[in-house]
Image (spheres, rainbow, N blue to C red):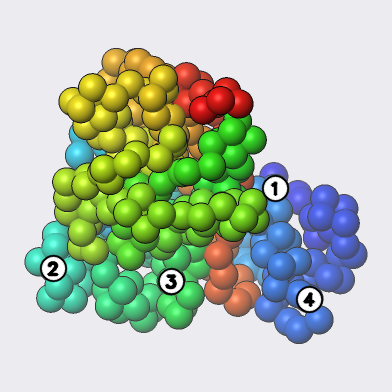
Amino acid sequence: MANVTMRDIGNRVGVSAVTVSKALAGKSGVSEEMRQRIIQAAAEMGYVNPNASLAVQERKLDVGILVPDHFFSGDSFYFTFYRHLVQTLTDAGHFGLMELLSKENDAKLELPNLIRHGRVDALILLGQPSREYIRMIAQQPLPVVFLDFFDESAAADAVVGDNTYGTCRLTNHLIKNGHRDIGFVGNCRSTTSIMDRYLGFFRAMLSHGLTIREECIIPDRSDEGDDVPLLLPEKLPTAFVCNCDIVALRLIGQLRERGIRVPEDVSVVGFDDFLPGAPQSPSLTTFRVDFHTMSQLAVKLLADRCAGMQRPFGRVVVSGQPVYRDSERALSAEE
């Protein structure tokens, strides 16, 4: 990994070593799309900045991991993500220290103890707090990476899953299977990830000239992230795209309470490929998030910043893949 050169990176993305050099140095003459492709390739290949001293390159970091506490529990998506992240830090020889961010501290814009007491060299913010808190964290002097969300106005790197593509592909799959009346479950004002997932759903519907019924856009949480009841329309669509698997499971349970079968009566798809506990019936069609690569890229971006690498802040999108299971079905021509 340490012997990867700019020429190697250029060969992978199809550009010259000079273009790679410009992109990594933040110089002009490279499109933003190509710059992000080069940055992602460099991180995935383990490129090390040759202009940083060996001592800096080999420095072992204390990395803070800050998680809003309403996202975190023993069987939550973010707990699983956190475990992947800690293992990635450990494999790279670094040390991770976690702190939970309470809603009270978020509202008061109080810095985490990890920063106030100078305990860490860099910080990963896993899960999206308030916009004001995001911007305050981005103004701190230590390197920061946002993981699983982004803020276009904050001076920090971000690593996100391919949210828009994922829900677009799932929605297109439903449309291909005969569904025309499709709903979305999620509050797109709550996080940028949910917003991007809604935009993927909307793009697929728009590209096929399909109407989205307003009553079929169902919030699953408040703007602050607290769960709210799912208010289903009187006339159900034939399928729902949910912003995450946990919400899909809530929806399936609520449909069952009304005597509505999944997928016989209504198809349901989720996102993340994450459901804790025993296998569910029906098994859920979803879009698998690549925890491993996202964690690797976040750690690599932080290590590069700590080693002195200079480049524009940006968002790196990590691809995932759809997983088709039993919670949705194709409609017949008569339905």
- Quarter of the image with the N terminus is top right
Q: For the residues marked 2 and 1, what is the alpha-carbon distance in whole angstroms? A: 38 Å
Residue 244, position as x, y percentages in the image: 38, 42
Dot label at residue 30 = 4
Q: For the residues marked 4 and 1, what is the alpha-carbon distance in whole angstroms? A: 20 Å
Q: For the residues marked 3 and 1, what is the alpha-carbon distance in whole angstroms? A: 26 Å
Closer to us: 73 or 118? 73
For badge 4, the amino acid type reads Val
Question: Judging from the image, what secondary structure is the residue with disc 3 in?
Answer: loop
Mark whose residue sits in front, 3 or 1: 3
Question: Judging from the image, what secondary structure is the residue with disc 2 in?
Answer: helix
Which residue does the numbered mark 1 point to in the structure image? 45
Dot label at residue 151 = 3
For badge 3, the amino acid type reads Asp
Q: Is residue 205 left or right of residue 93?
A: right
Residue 209, position as x, y percentages in the image: 62, 55
Q: For the residues marked 2 and 3, what is the alpha-carbon distance in whole angstroms? A: 20 Å
N-terminal of the pair, mark 3 or mark 1, is 1
N-terminal of the pair, mark 2 or mark 3, is 2
Mark whose residue sits in front, 4 or 3: 3
